[in-house]
Amino acid sequence: MPQLEIETFLPQLVWLVITFGFIYFVMAKFALPRVGEILEERQNRLDGDLEQAESYKAESEKLEADYDRLTAQARMEARTHLKVMRKKLDAGLAEKRTDMSAKMDKKFAAAEANITVARNEVLDDLEKIASDACISIVAKLSGQKLSATEAGKAVKANLLGRT
C-alpha cells in the first residue's frame, strides 16, 4: 500500500495540509458564512414568530377579559331590567286584580239584589198561593167561606213563624 510507505509519507502529509487548508479556506469564506446566515435567519424567524405568538396570546387574554367583563355587565343589566319589568308587571297585575275584584263585587252585589228581589217575589207569590189554597181548603173542609184578608193574615203568621 502506497499510503503506508515511509518514503511517500512526508509528501502525503504536505498534500494533506494543503488540501485541508484549501477546504478550510473555502468552507470558512463561502459555505460556513452562508450556513451561519441561514441559521441566524431561521433563529430570527423563530424569535419573531414567538414574539408574535406571545403578542397574540396577550391580545387574546385581553379580549377574553373584555368578553368576561362585558358578559358580566350584560348579566347585571339583564337582571336589573328583569327586576324593573317584574315590578311593572306586578303593579299592573295588582291593578287588574283590584279592578277585577271591584267588578266582581259589583256583580255579586247585583246578583244578591236580584236574588233578594226574586226571593221577595217568590214569597209574595207563595203567600198568594197559600192564601188561595187556605181559602179553598177551609171552604171544602168546613163549608165556610174565608175572606182573603183573614187567609192572608193566617198565612203570614205561619210563614213569619217559620222564616
Image: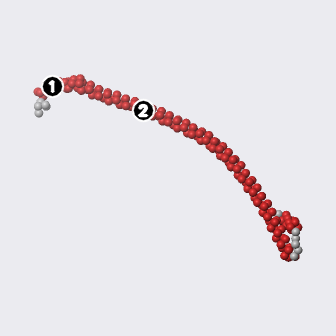
Q: Position of residue 79 (x, y in %)?
A: 58, 40
In this view of the protein, which residue sits in the foreground, 117 or 96?
A: 117
Q: Residue at x 65, y 44 (%)?
A: 92
Where residue 81 appears, as percent x and y from the top left, is 59, 39
Residue 145 figure quarter: bottom right
Disc 2 on helix, strand or loop? Answer: helix
Looking at the figure, which quarter contains the N terminus?
A: top left
Find residue 67 and report its horizontal and vertical position in percent.
Answer: 50, 36
Task: Answer with left or right where residue 78 lies relative to residue 64.
Answer: right
Q: For the residue carrying disc 2, how many other residues have a C-alpha within 10 Å: few (<14), some (14-19), or many (20+)?
A: few
- Disc 1 designates what residue? 15
In this rendering, is residue 11 above or below 161?
A: above
Residue 43, compared with residue 147, is above or below; it is above
What amino acid is labelled 2 in the image?
A: Tyr
Q: Percent x, y for residue 5? A: 12, 30
State the SS at label 1: helix
Locate residue 56 relative to residue 90 in the image: left or right.
left
Residue identified by numbered label 2: 56
Q: Amino acid at mark 1?
A: Trp
Q: Residues within 10 Å of mark 1 (few under 14, many from 20)?
A: few
Q: How far apart are labels 2 and 1 at the CA level?
A: 58 Å
Viewer-closest of 51 and 29: 51
Q: Report which quarter residue 72 is drawn in.
A: top right
Foreground: 62 or 12?
62
**In the image, what residue occupies the spot 72% across and 53% down?**
107
Is residue 75 placed above or below 121 in the rendered structure?
above
- Kindly tell me whether residue 17 is visible in this rendering: no
**Quarter of the image with the C terminus in it:** bottom right
Q: Quadrant of residue 144?
A: bottom right
Residue located 83% across and 72% down the image:
136
Residue 115 falls left or right of residue 27: right
Q: Which numbered disc, 2 or 1, marks the residue that appears first in the sequence?
A: 1
